[in-house]
Image: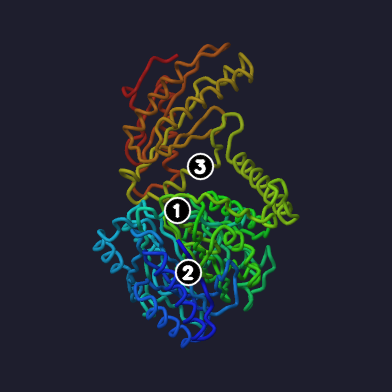
Amino acid sequence: MKQFQTVYRDRESFRSSVAEWKAWQDAHAPGQALVHIFSDDADVADVSCAREIVGHLLPDASCIGASASGNIFEGNITTEKLVVTCTVFEHSDSFVRTRFFSIENRDASTLRTALRAMKADFAGVKAIEVIMTIDTIPIREVCAILQEEIPEHIPIWGGGAFGDNVFTAYIFDKGQANTHGIVLAMMGGGDLHVMTSYVIGWKPLGSALKVTRAKGKVLCELDGNPAYQIYQHYLRIPNDEHIFYNALEFPFAVSHQNRILLRHALACHDDGSIDMSTDIPEGSILHLTYGDPDTIMQNVSLCADQVRDFAPEVISIFDCFGRKSFWGGTEGSRETRPLHKLAPTYGFCTAGELIRWQGGMDHHNLSLVVAAMREGGPGEQEMTAIQEEVRQNESSMSMVSRLVNFINTATAEVIEANTRLSIMAITDQLTQLYNRGEIQRQITERIQENCSAPVGENATSLVMIDLDDFKQINDTYGHNEGDQVLIAVSAQIRAALEALGNGAVGGRWGGEEFMVMLPGMPLDAAAAFAESLRVRIENLHFALCGRETASFGVAQAQPGEEADPLVLRADVALYVAKKSGKNRVCRADGKGEHTGKRTVYESDAR
């Protein structure tokens, strides 16, 4: 593969450059060529002229491009407005084919239909580069379609044309500019090899946040508070026209299909809601992140090491314009130069990136997407080493990194301590079951949610348990033996509940009394469960008191019945079990009617 690159400054010099490319291709390379034209607010007439000259002198070349928020020229983020790159495939069987798909009214169904109709076109394809107008198409749906309809062995990477309130995002294919669509550059050939990778570099900061309200790209609430509060309270970022740039160092990280994606704020409304770079569904868990130059460059260095091992001939770079803004314009070149030292590069600063990675296709923000390409095996020439200026000693950390590491560690310790306190607040310390307050709260919540029709999955049964003659154990053998009995019985209750696996819970109701809630279980099944637990307790053996038994009262919630009357019916059924000889299960049948059936699950009293 051979790459040519130039900047458009005037018609004649540009024409001369393209003519030289054509002459070299005719003399050395029978393969096809792929031309990229990237415009960072270039004059429309200049863009048209460049496309016209390419079409005239390289009629067989595929030509695509996009509006950009910065161009990459000779490995640097440049202020040049119009950069044109020609990548020539040197092997005779190498090829490149481009296809444009219009997506009008944010309806991506036509894209799926078109991709399904061109299955045969993917034969021999080794990689696909994608450029799209992200703001005018349903990007998450488009990513899903590309993932599902393009054979999974084909790597895909790309980026979004840049557009904002002033400039319209556009892409073009074969000289035609489009503002609503996607273009695929399908590359193939027996000796074409492509590897893809991407770099993030931002690190989590503080504790997790839950999206409690969102509408499309508008992030309304985090943990029940206005989303902007996180920036105002912790970072003192004012809600003004500069919020995009001030918040850029602190994007949100969201987990999606076992991958971490960054999402950054674009603007903030008076109500505290934030316009985000893409949709963030309600229920998502976010982390605020921070950008540290040393950490970012460490990640760039690791990526460059992988690319160097691949030994590329050409490298494609799609760099988020947010990273360019983070670095400060052309200072973003520190990320792209290390890759250019390995092989000639082309690309642009995008309005979002995409890459197929580990079986998924995602839309990224604030990422650096890289595709390394070559024809044939790795070259025998020694690859250029990455300059030491971008290598970071793994043992070194910037002061910012150390401070943030301190904050994150301290935050994690506080969260862990609070979690332990929360558990302690609802747990009986001796038995490790829920305490009465918590089991009562869960029963009340369950009954309130299912009071209208407590049948089937919505059924709820209670099992109330009382150890028989427990006071005698304490009086005769001491409270330590009594505690051992309580601990052993509680372990049997926990084991029985875990075996059910249906969300059943148990708690210590007080003293030697226990309560079990069985969701989705009718009275007959609950009574059978109680009987099995009765047998397990009866079979326990203790060093001093020998054995202990328990009596059980079982009740099922009735339509419209509240929690307290249900508990009372279970309590009355337990009372009947006690009066009927103990060590047995009795049921409460019918709303308001409390009857113990001695013939059900009855056993000999102690």
Whether residue 273 appears in this view of the structure is no
Quadrant containing the N terminus is bottom left
Between disc 2 and disc 1, the foreground one is 1
Residue occupied by mark 1: 357
Q: Please, what is the three-letter code of the amino acid marked with disc 3?
A: Gln
The foreground one among 198 and 268 is 198
Q: Please, what is the three-letter code of the amino acid marked with disc 1?
A: Trp
Q: Please, what is the three-letter code of the amino acid marked with disc 2?
A: Lys
Quadrant containing the C terminus is top left
Q: Residue shown at 46%/53% (left/top)?
A: 195
Q: Which residue lies furthest to the bottom in this view?
A: 45
Q: Is mark 2 on a helix, strand or loop?
A: loop
Labels 2 and 1 touching (C-beta < 8 A): no
The foreground one among 212 and 286 is 286
Between disc 1 and disc 3, the foreground one is 1
Residue 457, position as x, y percentages in the image: 33, 44
Q: How far apart are marks 1 and 3 (CA)?
A: 48 Å
